[in-house]
Image (tube, rainbow, N blue to C red):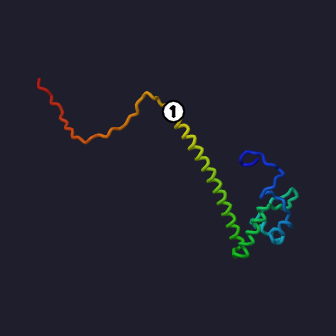
């Protein structure tokens, strides 16, 4: 099942479908298969596993391998730093998804509140005159208590 409740075609390939064996993934990413195994051990890129424990890489994994290579070779970042960058990027993506989810919930609640408000306004009696606050003029009022009257 997908997030929106529809059934997903099990034969449809997505960016996250694990289809590439390690040799093909190594070729596509431009890395040595042993490097891919090392990245897996370090937790940088963790491919899915088959029942026989073989690694299967997705297109997203291949892209991540290329990113790791670029950060390592071109930017000079060590593998621990790259792992932290990946973790933070994943955290940001998860938080953005949560913000979108909460924004949608807030919009739904606001719409429901407007509907309830409209229903309340529709139920008002029309024979009543709405009260309007009249601005008071400034005036001085002197109060004098009544004196007790003599018997």
Image position of 137 (left or right of 94): left
Identity of the residue drawn at 45% across and 29% down: 126
Identity of the residue drawn at 71% across and 47% down: 4
Q: Residue 110's spot in the image, x, y percent? A: 56, 44
Q: Nearer the viewer, residue 14 or 130?
A: 130
Identity of the residue drawn at 85% across and 57% down: 50
Image position of 37 (left or right of 79): right
Mark 1 crowd level (few <14, some 14–19, many ≥20, 10 Å Cα): few
Q: Residue 91's spot in the image, x, y percent? A: 66, 60
Element carrying mark 1: helix
Q: Nearer the viewer, residue 4 or 130?
A: 130
Residue at the spot of label 1: 122
Quarter of the image with the C terminus in it: top left
Total numbered labels: 1
Q: Quadrant of residue 93?
A: bottom right
Q: Nearer the viewer, residue 78 or 73?
A: 73
Outermost left residue: 150
Q: Residue 41's spot in the image, x, y percent? A: 78, 66
Q: Residue 83's spot in the image, x, y percent? A: 70, 67
Outermost top residue: 151
Q: Is residue 121 above or below residue 57?
A: above
Identity of the residue drawn at 46% across and 29% down: 125
Q: Quadrant of residue 85?
A: bottom right
Q: Nearer the viewer, residue 41 or 82?
A: 82
Image position of 6 (left or right of 150): right
Q: Is residue 113 above or below residue 93?
A: above
């Amino acid at each position: 099942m997908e997030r929106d409740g529809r059934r997903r075609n099990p034969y449809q390939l997505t960016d996250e479908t694990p289809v590439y064996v390690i040799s093909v993934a190594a070729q596509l990413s431009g890395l040595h298969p042993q490097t891919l195994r090392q990245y897996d051990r370090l937790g940088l890129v963790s491919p899915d596993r088959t029942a026989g424990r073989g690694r299967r890489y997705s297109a997203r994994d291949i892209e991540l391998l290329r990113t790791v290579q670029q950060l390592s070779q071109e930017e000079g970042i060590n593998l621990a730093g790259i792992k932290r960058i990946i973790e933070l990027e994943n955290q940001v993506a998860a938080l953005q998804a949560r913000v979108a989810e909460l924004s949608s919930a807030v919009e739904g609640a606001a719409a429901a509140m407007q509907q309830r408000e409209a229903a309340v306004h529709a139920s008002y009696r029309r024979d009543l005159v709405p009260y309007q606050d009249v601005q008071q003029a400034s005036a001085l009022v002197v109060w004098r208590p009544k004196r007790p009257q003599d018997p």
